Image: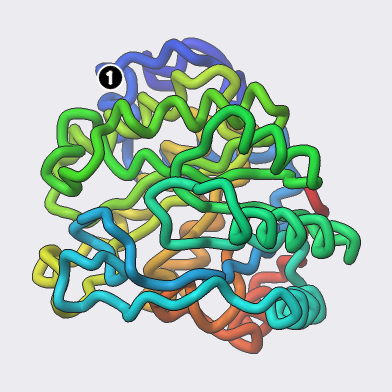
Amino acid sequence: MKKSMKSLPGTVRHDWTLQEIEELYASSLPDLVFYAQQALRAHHDPNKVQMCALLSIKTGGCPENCGYCSQSTHHGAASAGTALMDTEEVLRRAAQAKADGANRICMGAAWREVQDGPDFERVLDMVRRISAMGLETCCTLGMLTQRQAERLAEAGLVSYNHNLDTSPEYYANIVSTRTYEDRLPTLAHVRKAGISVCCGGIIGMGESLRDRLRLLQELSSQTPHPDSVPINMLVRVKGTPLAEAREVDPFELVRMFALTRILIPKAYVRISAGRAELSREVQALCFLAGANSVFSGEKLLTTPNPCSDEDRELFKALKLSAGPKR
């Protein structure tokens, strides 16, 4: 076993050094997948996959300038800003997602930060009513105050997504309208309110390998660890600054999933954006490497995603089934 594995795979640690993570990454792929499988099986059923649905309830018009995002007002690709989606339509979409096998609904709004007022009150009502349908609720709404996090918890919110995107050192290359440090208070507010944290990042934005490993080091140093870790592969959108970014080698992606599983063993590790560009075989490798959650539905906010029928066929071929709620 690698020197970096001071303890058995599956042991929860918050003190991984960059050198240890680099050594693990340098393992042969069979060894790395083996360690990841051990970590997965220590805490999860390896044959079950959590199914989540992501719904954009307020699309476009975002004042942030994230280089990867088609919803930014700073880019030519910007989606036209829309009003907050009608509550009944959100409930209809949630019911359809449940019928398609999802057990968690994540609602995303293209806001820099939540503003108190009618729109936030409607989001709280959506959380209450979707929770009453027997579905877990997750939101990604931008930055929150402590009181806003508490109100979401009172409404029944299970999880809040707030990604770190990349390493602290590379962050300013991706967005300049906020800092890496601006992200951290919301994570603290969410935890204090008793809501589980969904926090991950994106690869393929021109970052170095060191940046990717530093991202995982940052995530694994959080106490407690995030309950969900989405690993996104950049979807190159025409008109955004990253439209011409280099494609990610599929084996690099598989290694990221394996490392995430080893470093954050209890989390649901989610194959997120970019899955539509992955072959069935690469997705199977990601599951072997410890991924155990996916987004279902034909669209992730504004980018393509495999349809439910494709997922059913893949799961049938791999003999996987939809996992239990958190």
- Which residue lies at the image location 82% right of the left edge and 54% below the top edge? 324
Q: Is residue 101 above or below residue 33?
A: below
Q: Is residue 198 above or below residue 17?
A: below
Q: Is residue 165 above or below residue 277?
A: above
- Which residue lies at the image location 51% right of the left edge and 38% below the top edge? 144
**Of 171 and 122, which appears nearest the observer?**
122
Q: Position of residue 262 (x, y in %)?
A: 50, 32
Mark 1 closeness class: few <14, some 14–19, many ≥20 residues within 10 Å: some
Q: Look at the image and tell me whether residue 213 can be seen.
A: yes
**Of 113 and 281, which appears nearest the observer?**
113
Answer with the quarter of the image where residue 177 lies: top left
- Which residue lies at the image location 63% right of the left edge and 68% below the top edge? 53
Q: Which residue is mark 1?
A: 18
Q: In this rendering, would 106 be left or right of 163?
A: right
Q: Position of residue 79 (x, y in %)?
A: 31, 78
Q: Position of residue 56 (x, y in %)?
A: 52, 71
- Which residue lies at the image location 16% right of the left edge and 37% below the top edge? 170
Q: Amino acid at mark 1?
A: Leu
Q: Could you tell me how many numbered marks the image carries?
A: 1
Q: Look at the image and tell me whether residue 26 can be seen.
A: no
Q: How is the image coloured?
A: rainbow
**Of 67 and 201, which appears nearest the observer?**
67
Q: In this rendering, would 291 be left or right of 303?
A: right
Location of the N terminus (image quadrant): top left
Location of the C terminus (image quadrant): top right
Q: Position of residue 31 (x, y in %)?
A: 42, 38
